[in-house]
Image: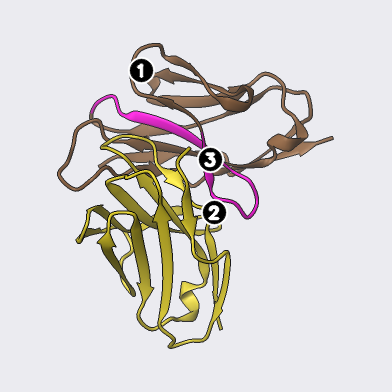
Chain colours: A brown, B yellow
């Protein structure tokens, strides 16, 4: 069974500082990987996704993530955080083969980002 | 752009009431999902549907049922609402296996 671990429940950074949110996954092969962001009271918005190819993927809002197969990780980074980045971030893993019951993403429990001005 | 809409942003119901949460997507997606979101627990899958009239249980189906009579619409039903079903409910849809899911804005349900 696939699983996702986001080891940091809360992270606080100063505006303008760099950011790295950690995500580790467990899956039998190379999965599809996603990062979502959720602003307070809103649904989830896709930041970026990895399917194959280049292991460094660029997303919206200046975010990027790097897939490291050897570490089973897909960490999210941003070089300079803005106050508007304060939100909850979710990593998700999806199957690469059709399992006969639709695709199911498995989500981590989320990392709450606070940005200090 | 894909749009997923949910019938209510906020809902207050009483214990024992039957509750319907509606979700509609406008991009002809095959797959639709219902999650509940609670602090510290992340997103937990309640049910999903991969075709009209087809459904499968997720991780926490107890106390819930679903209906998908049309491709664009997926309903979550709480047969007899209980206080422990107070939560944020999120609907999502996706086109094919492994693809990203598109989320609605959520319904915050309070059961008194």
Q: Nearer the viewer, residue B10 or A68?
A: B10
Same chain shared by disc 2 and disc 3: no
Coordinates of residue B80 in the picture (x, y in percent): 38, 84
Residue at point 36% right, 66% down? Answer: B75
Q: Secondary structure at mark 3?
A: strand
As drawn, the label of residue B105 is 2
Question: Does residue A107 lie above or below B88 as drawn?
Answer: above
Residue A86 on the magenta segment = no
Residue at the outermost top position? A54
Q: Secondary structure at mark 2?
A: loop
Chain part drawn in magenta: A29-46
Residue at point 31% right, 39% down? Answer: B95
Q: Where does label 1 land, which residue?
A: A70
Residue at point 52% right, 72% down? Answer: B86
What is the C-alpha distance between the residues marked 3 and 1? 28 Å
Please state if B98 lies on the left or on the right of A56 as rendered: left
Chain letter, disc 2 residue: B
Please state if A8 lies on the left or on the right of B61 as rendered: right
Coordinates of residue A54 in the picture (x, y in percent): 40, 11
How many numbered circles are shown? Answer: 3
Q: Secondary structure at mark 1?
A: helix
Residue at point 26% right, 37% down? Answer: B97
Q: Where does label 3 land, which residue?
A: A45
**Which quadrant would residue B78 be assigned to in this image?**
bottom left
Q: Nearer the viewer, residue B78 or A24?
A: B78
Question: Sequence order check: which comes first, mark 3 or mark 1?
Answer: 3
Question: Does residue B58 lie above or below B10 as drawn?
Answer: above
């Amino acid at each position: 069974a696939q699983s996702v671990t986001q080891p940091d429940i809360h992270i606080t950074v100063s505006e303008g500082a760099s950011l790295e949110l950690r995500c580790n996954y467990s899956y039998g092969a190379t999965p599809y990987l996603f990062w979502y962001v959720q602003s307070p009271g809103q649904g989830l918005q896709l930041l970026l996704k990895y399917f194959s190819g280049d292991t460094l993927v660029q997303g919206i809002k200046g975010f990027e993530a790097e897939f490291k197969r050897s570490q089973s990780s897909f960490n999210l980074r941003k070089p300079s955080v803005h106050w508007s980045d304060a939100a909850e971030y979710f990593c998700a893993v999806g199957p690469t083969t059709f399992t006969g019951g639709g695709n199911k993403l498995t989500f981590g429990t989320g990392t709450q980002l606070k940005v200090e001005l | 752009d894909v749009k997923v809409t949910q019938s209510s942003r906020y809902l207050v119901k009483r214990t024992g009431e039957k509750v319907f949460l509606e979700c509609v997507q406008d991009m002809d997606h095959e797959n639709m999902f219902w999650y509940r979101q609670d602090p510290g627990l992340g997103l937990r899958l309640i049910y999903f549907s991969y075709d009209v009239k087809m459904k499968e249980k997720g991780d926490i189906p107890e106390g819930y049922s679903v209906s998908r009579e049309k491709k664009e619409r997926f309903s979550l039903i709480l047969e007899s609402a209980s206080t422990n079903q107070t939560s944020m409910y999120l609907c999502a849809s996706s086109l094919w296996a492994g693809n990203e899911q598109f989320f609605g804005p959520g319904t915050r349900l309070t059961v008194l």
